[in-house]
Amino acid sequence: MADTRSTAPVGLPARNPVRAGGSRARSKGWTGALPLLVFVGLAFGIPALALLGGAFTSNGSPSLANLTESLRGAYLTALLSSVKLSALVAVVGAVLGTFLAQAVVTSRFRALRDAVLTASGVLANFGGVPLAFAWIATLGNSGVLTTRLGLGDHGWSLYSFWGLALVYLYFSVPLMVLVIVPALDGLRPQWREAAQNNGASAWQFWRYVGIPVLTPSLLGGVVLLFGGAFAAYATAAAMVGTVVPLVTLQIADALTGNVLIGHENVALALSFDMIVVAGLVMAVYLPLQRRSARWLR
Amino acid sequence: MAALTPTVLPDVTGAPAPQTGRPRRVRVWRGVVLTVAALYFLTPLLASFVFTVNDPTAGFTLDAYQEIFSAEGFVQSLLLSLGLAVATIVTVLVLTLPAMLAVRLSAPRLRPVMEVLCTLPLVVPPITFVAGISTVLRWGPDYLATTPFYQTIIAIQDPAFPVVLVVAYVVLALPFVYRALDAGLGAMDVRTLVEAARNCGASWPHVMLRVIIPNLRSGLASASFLTLALVLGEYTVARLLGYQPFPVWIVTISGSNAPLSVAVSIFSLLFAWLLLLVLSTAGTRQRSGS
């Protein structure tokens, strides 16, 4: 930074036309960023303001009625159920993802590692509608495994809280693998050797070296997984309809007027609740991301 | 220390892999983890394939796959999705690339602003974003009917090509595009390249087309592919705003023809897989080239 600044005045005055170009470049630099800022301001800012405005007005006057309504009865149940599902998926997904990543990282087969990472990249994005249908075909009421194994007689239903958790793990575990592999790679073999030379057991190595180094990435992964499961709508909508109460399904119902006409503002208040929850969780993530970046070099 | 060294030394020097100190247990444990993972991740794929080719009465049949291309609305919805994807990719790159260059070259103080802007869409769940958009769109008939804005609001909701979806997708794609381009720009010395080109008298469009973009190929490719995957799989925004691109169409037909919808799901997964393979090979070619 410092030396580019010191070389620029030396190099530039030598040729006047270039100097003019250089100063124009500076003003162009600002204008280069302008379209994006304006676009985001319009495309993101206006809906955000509309959401806030709608959430805090009822019958045309400012009030907290929508917000209290959104934290009561069926809406509260849906919100809590969403948080519970996302927390479960996040913690279980993080643990399983870390085990899978560790198995891959310590493997001697380069091809296995490449295959798992590529597959994780695909599966982490394999949310939404196709995922729901793949699982319905597998474990739904007339799914291949359900009918072959007679799971229906044992009270199995995919269209439940646990079924949904099982399906959400399908994109959460690969996401965790993608998040945690760089951190596991950052655990240098020298650290383990140093611990072994000092007589540490495997458990002591993980307890005092491995886990502390991985903690920021682990928590960051949990947060990402939570966010992904919390915001998921397509999978749930295609799979369970309204059997499992989820806040995203409630918002969609209220928006499309499925429940009651005039509940759009409650949908906005629910959206506001969601953003608050997601924002709080993400607020944990950003500083952690910065801390873990130190180890990933 | 002196007593420890002889017992540890052969272990370290004689072992190529660090885990040979505890081989059997670790290998078994790793095998179990990998087997369980493989079962969990492959079962739905295989089972859904079986589901599509297994007719309860006729036995094995590939009808579901033959029906895909002739199914009503398939071509239309796929074309709509592809059109939206192209428009989104072009828009997001045209907006983001100059902004990121500007931040790197002449306005480093904007960097935190850019980072926040490009992280927000990850924090804000898409469904709340749609809630905001649909509120704004409802203002049209309610408040703006007498103003020129009304025409704009009608125009961007044209069902043949809903511009409002492109706008929403650009916002949703920003985090991915930002990261891909940031990695690409970080791998080259933008300032030196631009200053060298400018000192040699190149115009700004020339710098962009002949210097920046060729060096940024892999970053641009990965940004485009990620955006393409996002748009082709996006359901929430399109469904709630009432349009019918590809994913919404799959759900619509699932009621009447379950095997067909599962077949299309497999089809779209294979497509995504292909995209990602192309992406990763493009990335490695770039790396080995440089």
Image (tube, helix red, strand yellow):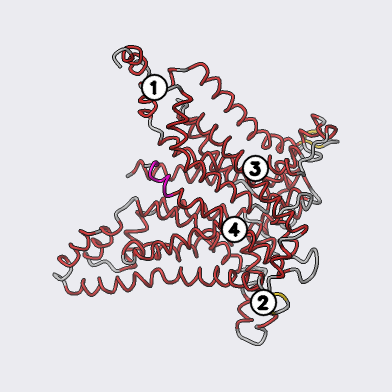
* Pointers 3 and 1 within a single chain: yes
| Dot 4 and dot 1 within a common chain | no
Residue ID for mark 4: B82
Q: Report whether residue B158 is seen.
A: no
**Which secondary structure, mark 4?**
helix
Which residue, given by chain and number where applicable, does mark 3 sit on?
A88
- Residue at 55 percent across and 23 percent down: it is B29
Query: How many angstroms separate mark 2 from mark 1 (CA)?
Result: 65 Å
Q: Looking at the picture, which amino acid does disc 1 mark?
A: Gln
> Mark 2 or mark 1: which comes first in sequence?
2
Give the labeled residue for mark 1: A196
Q: Measure the alpha-carbon separation of dots 3 and 1.
A: 35 Å
Q: Are marks 4 and 3 on the same chain?
A: no
Q: Is residue B29 above or below residue B94?
A: above
Q: Tag 1: Cα neighbours inside 10 Å, few (<14), some, or many (≥20)?
A: some
Residue carrying label 2: A62
Image quadrant where residue A87 sits? top right
Chain of the residue where label 1 is placed in the rendered structure: A
Q: Amino acid at mark 3?
A: Leu
Q: CA distance from mark 4 to mark 2?
A: 43 Å
Residue B72 visible in the current orientation: yes
Q: Position of residue B81 (x, y in %)?
A: 62, 58
Chain name for mark 4 = B
